[in-house]
Each structure stands twice: as C-alpha cells, then as structure tokens.
Image (cartoon, coloured by chain):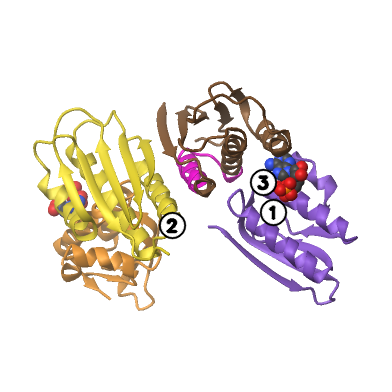
Chain colours: A yellow, B brown, C orange, D purple
Amino acid sequence: MENIKLVIPKKSEYLSTIRLTTSALSSINGYNLDDIDDLKVILSEICIFFINNVKKNEKPFEIEYFIEENKLKIEVCDLNDGEITDVSKEKSEMCILIIESLADNYIVDLKNKKICFEKKCIDIE
Amino acid sequence: MENIKLVIPKKSEYLSTIRLTTSALSSINGYNLDDIDDLKVILSEICIFFINNVKKNEKPFEIEYFIEENKLKIEVCDLNDGEITDVSKEKSEMCILIIESLADNYIVDLKNKKICFEKKCIDIE
Amino acid sequence: MSLDIKYSKTSDNNYLEIKPIGEVDISTSPEFKNKVIELIEKEKIDISINADELEYIDSTGLGVLMGILMKVKEHGLSIQIINLKPNIYKLFDITGLNKVFNIK
Amino acid sequence: MSLDIKYSKTSDNNYLEIKPIGEVDISTSPEFKNKVIELIEKEKIDISINADELEYIDSTGLGVLMGILMKVKEHGLSIQIINLKPNIYKLFDITGLNKVFNIK
Ligand SMILES: Nc1ncnc2c1ncn2[C@@H]1O[C@H](COP(=O)(O)OP(=O)(O)O)[C@@H](O)[C@H]1O
Ligand SMILES: Nc1ncnc2c1ncn2[C@@H]1O[C@H](COP(=O)(O)OP(=O)(O)O)[C@@H](O)[C@H]1O
C-alpha cells in the first residue's frame, strides 16, 4: 500500500492544483480517464463542501491518498477549529448529490471535519 | 506566506506527479513557463540525487513549498534513516551541476538529507 | 488552466452565444456569473451557452448556471446549452439539471 | 505522460532516426537505453535522435545518452541530435553535453 499526503491552503484557487495532483497520481496507478475525472470531481466537491460549511480558513486542507491493490482511498480533512453545526443546505445540496453519486463507501465525519471515500479501479493490469 | 506540503513515496514513478504538482502551484503563483520548467527540473534532480545517494527507500520524500511575496522556497527531505556518507560521483555530477545552475541560494544538508533552494519570481503582477 | 469567456451573436442574430473556455469552478464562477448577467442585461436576447471548450464545472458553476437561468426567465428570455462534453453532461444528469435546462 | 519510442530509416537510408515522444526520465530512461542499444546492435547504422517531441529529460536521461554515445563509438558509428527544444537544450548547455554531442 502506498500513501501520499498533500497539505494545501484552504483557498479556492488551490483546487486546480489538487485536481492536477490527483490526476497525476491516479494515472500512474492505472485508472482510466473516466475514473480520473470522477476522482477530481469528488475531491473538488468535498473541498467546496468544507469551504461552504466551515467558517474558518486559516488552517489548510490535509488530503491523504491510500493506494491499495485495486482501489484508491482518499481522506480529506479540514484542519480548522470547531465542528460543523449547520450544513448550508442551499450551497451544499449539489455538492452532496455529486459526492454520493460518484464515490464508493463515503464517510462524513462532521465532528472532525473529515470526509473519506473510495474508488475502485477496474482497469488495473 | 503560503505553505504546501507533499509527502510522496521515494519511487521514480512518482517524480512525474511531483513535477505536475509543482507546475500547478507555480502557475497559480505567477511564474512564467521558463521558470516553471526550471522549478520542475531542479526538484526532479534533487529527488534523483537522494535516490542515488541514500540507500533506503522505505520512507517517503517530504517536499515543502513556501510561497513568499516574490520568491518560492522549496525544501526536499528524504525521510529515510542514516546520513549520506559517500556521494556517488558518477551518477551525481550532472544532478549537482543542474541544481547549481538553475537554483538560487541552494543549501545541501547531507546529515539531515535535506536540500533547500529558492527561485525568484520576476513576472509576478 | 483557468477561464476565458468569448461571446458573439449567432449568424441568424437569434442568440448571443457565450463560450466559456476552460474551467467554471469555485474560483472562476463569480467572474463567469458577472460577465453573463452583464451581457443579458445589456443585450436582452436569448442565450446559447456553447460548452465545447468547457473542460470542467463544479457545483458552484452549476449553481451559477441556475442563477443565470433565473435572470434569463426574469427578462422573459430563454437559455440553451449546446455541445456539453460527456463528463460534464454527467454532472447535469446527477444533479437533475439536465431536466431544468434546454440541452442540445 | 510517459515515453513512447518511434524509429525509422531516413529517406536517404543514411540514418536510423529515433524519436522519443514524452519524457526520458529516471523512470523511463532504462527502457529508452535498452531499445536504442538493441537498435544499434541490430542495424549498425548512424543514429539521429529526433527530439522534436521530447518534452522532458533529466540527468538520468542525459547519462543514458552518454552511454549510447559510447556504444555508437564502439561500433565506429556516429550519432546526432536534432530539433531539441530550447528548455531541453538548456540542460545540454549546463552539463556541457552540447560540446560532446553533434546537435543540429
Ligand atoms: N453549490 C450549490 N449547490 C446547490 N445549489 C446551489 C449551489 N450554488 C448555488 N445554488 C443555487 O443556485 C442559486 C443561484 O446561485 P448563486 O448564483 O451562487 O446564488 P446567489 O445569486 O444567491 O449569489 C441559489 O439560489 C441556489 O439555490
Ligand atoms: N546522473 C548522471 N550524472 C552524471 N553522469 C552520469 C549520470 N548517469 C550516467 N552518467 C554517465 O553516463 C555513463 C553511462 O550511463 P549509464 O548508461 O546510466 O551507466 P551504465 O552503462 O554504467 O549503467 C556513466 O558511465 C556515467 O559516467
């Protein structure tokens, strides 16, 4: 199992860097283009969820990738203080719908501001 | 000042991910294409230097980017045990020549297996 | 890659065709929204979003499209979206926006 | 992006033109070295490396080119490198390999 960690400012302009890193990692690990697209979308929506629902932005996002035999597990943690009390329904409905539709086994931990998901890799040689 | 950290396996196939992440980060921070190329080259050569001169590979590389007003500072640390005792002259001559030519203020700490460098950003708006 | 916005009237003069080139995401969608709303207010003409060079959209961008739809309706105008790439259409499908927008 | 290697005789039959497409770096250069050495052993003909689609090379790739140069000389053959992009030529310049290779 391999493990990659990215700690990056909680700012919207860094989401494109997160997407590029994710697509580089998933292409060396045998994902096809459709799956890579899904991974980029899921990860971006998780970050948007935190940007819209956690008030503070001083501390960064911590993103961990766990590369396993035939799946990729990704954990996104918003390192800012305080737990999420109200989810902004208006802004987050679409986020959640997209994450739910594209991710396998996703787990939302509002207390620790951590969202985890998996994506199976079908194409691996 | 902003700060990005990437912890990634010490394996040659991950160098392309390091290059892509670096180029994404430096393009949002106003570097021009030539500077981005230099940054990718320097960072790759530092990783190659560690791959050729530190025997163990179990632990990852830890790469930290410090984005300052008009320069980017990057620190690469090989987290494996032991200090570097002999530098493989044959394999590392070109590495070092390239790093020396392209990086500003680079500092090599063989004991801690850490190499630090800066690159000025001339193009920033 | 970020966002570039081009626009021109279609040859039949029936539509203002707006072409987002690149990514309409959380960092670029405010700019996209402002530009399109400004064009609607100024031109008062039906809108056609040509998405053939739209490489990425996120929920923020989809939200902005909904805001644009409301603005268009407010003026009694219509909006269509053409040439969506399959990976982007997928998001319209997931969120049900494929039923809200006239997609061609 | 990784590495693809194409090759063919030039129309005058004087050279085997080898075209690395992508990146010749620490992870792909062993493959590049093996392929080129194999071609030299088999064809025993002068080599022209066409670098117009070489996007990236690192010190490992430069080292492999030196190894190839030695192999070529061993057989009394020659090697030239053509169409180097400026960002890659820069590395030949820094390392002095621009004086070792016949670059066009
Ligand atoms: N991320 C989102 N998820 C779900 N709905 C959204 C999202 N963003 C915006 N919307 C919806 O689209 C409408 C217009 O969005 P927007 O232009 O961002 O809002 P506003 O005009 O209130 O600033 C909002 O009223 C909201 O219902
Ligand atoms: N990273 C490098 N820096 C400097 N010189 C190198 C490097 N890699 C290879 N060389 C030089 O190029 C020659 C051939 O390289 P290579 O094909 O990797 O070696 P070998 O044939 O010994 O496995 C070596 O003898 C060495 O002098």
* Residue D6 position within the rendered picture, expressed as x and y whole percent measured from the top left: 66, 69
x and y percent of residue D95 in the render? 75, 40
**Region of the chain picked out in magenta, as a range:** B17-34
**Local crowd size for mark 3, using a 10 Å CA cut-off: few (<14), some (14–19), many (≥20):** many
Comparing marks 3 and 1, which lies closer to the viewer?
3
Task: Indicate left or right for A37 with A105 as reference.
Answer: right
Q: Where residue C87 sits: x, y (%)?
A: 32, 66
Q: Residue at x 40, y 29 (%)?
A: B2
**Residue that carries the numbered disc 3 in the rendered image:** D60
Q: Nearer the viewer, residue D86 or D38?
A: D38
- Chain letter of disc 2? A
On residue A27, which mark appears? Answer: 2
Q: Residues within 10 Å of mark 1 (few under 14, many from 20)?
A: some
At numbered mark 3, what does the secondary structure look like: helix, strand or loop?
helix
Occupied quadrant, residue C8: bottom left
C44 magenta-colored: no
Mark 1 to mark 2 CA distance (whole Å):
26 Å
Q: Is mark 3 within 8 Å of ligand 2?
A: yes
For disc 2, the neighbor class at 10 Å (few under 14, some 14 to 19, many from 20) is some
Under mark 3, the amino acid is Thr
| Residue for point 69% across, 60% down | D34
Which three-letter amino acid code belongs to the residue tagged 2? Ser
Q: Residue at x 34, y 34 (%)?
A: A9
